[in-house]
Amino acid sequence: MGIVKISDELHEELRKASSVMSRSINSQAEFWIKMGMLAELHPQLSFNQIIANLMQSANVSASNVSTAEEYTDA
């Protein structure tokens, strides 16, 4: 593990985003770094396509997950 120096402003944004996303600050930073790296390697893909590819490669299936609309229709 290494140390990465970032601005105080970016650290504050990481702190806020990590709270919203229920991640640690380090996990949020790692997520942003990973997504940025994948976006640079695959500029033709959208964020949602990158996430879908990651989910598919991890064999995650959303077929058994209910949507918000299904809860409100009940």
Image: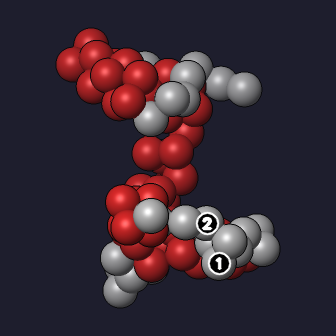
Furthest-front residue in this view: 74
Identify the residue at horizontal 21%, vertical 19% (top origin).
9
State whether residue 32 is above or below residue 60: above
Q: Residue at x 54, y 29 (%)?
A: 23
Q: Quadrant of residue 47?
A: bottom left
For the residue pair 7 and 65, the one nearer the viewer reads as 65
Q: Choose between 56 and 1: the one closer to the eye.
A: 56
- The residue sitting at 36% across, 60% down in the picture is 72
Q: Name the residue under label 1.
A: 63
The answer to which of 3 and 57 lies nearer the viewer is 57
How far across and down, in percent of the image, does residue 71 sit?
Answer: 44, 59
Which of the 4 image quarters holds residue 3? top right
Badge 1, how many Cα within 10 Å: few under 14, some, many 20+?
Answer: few
Name the amino acid, label 1: Ser
Quarter occupied by the N terminus: top right
Callout 2 secondary element:
loop
Left or right: residue 47 compared with residue 41? left
Report which quarter residue 70 is drawn in: bottom left
Amino acid tagged 2: Val
Question: Residue furthest toward the bottom?
Answer: 44
Asked whether the beta carbons under mark 2 and mark 1 sit within 8 Å of each other, the answer is yes
Disc marking residue 33? none
Residue pointed to by mark 2: 65
| Left or right: residue 15 compared with residue 9 | right
Residue 4 visible in the snapshot: no
**Where 34 sits versus 20, above or below?**
below
In-image side of 55 versus 48 (left or right): right
Look at the numbered disc 1 and give the secondary structure of its residue.
Answer: loop
Residue 31: x percent and y percent?
A: 52, 45
Q: For the C terminus, which image quadrant?
A: bottom left
The crowding category of the residue bearing disc 2, from other C-alpha atoms within 10 Å (few below 14, some 14 to 19, many at least 20), is: few
- Residue 42, x across and y down, in percent: 45, 79
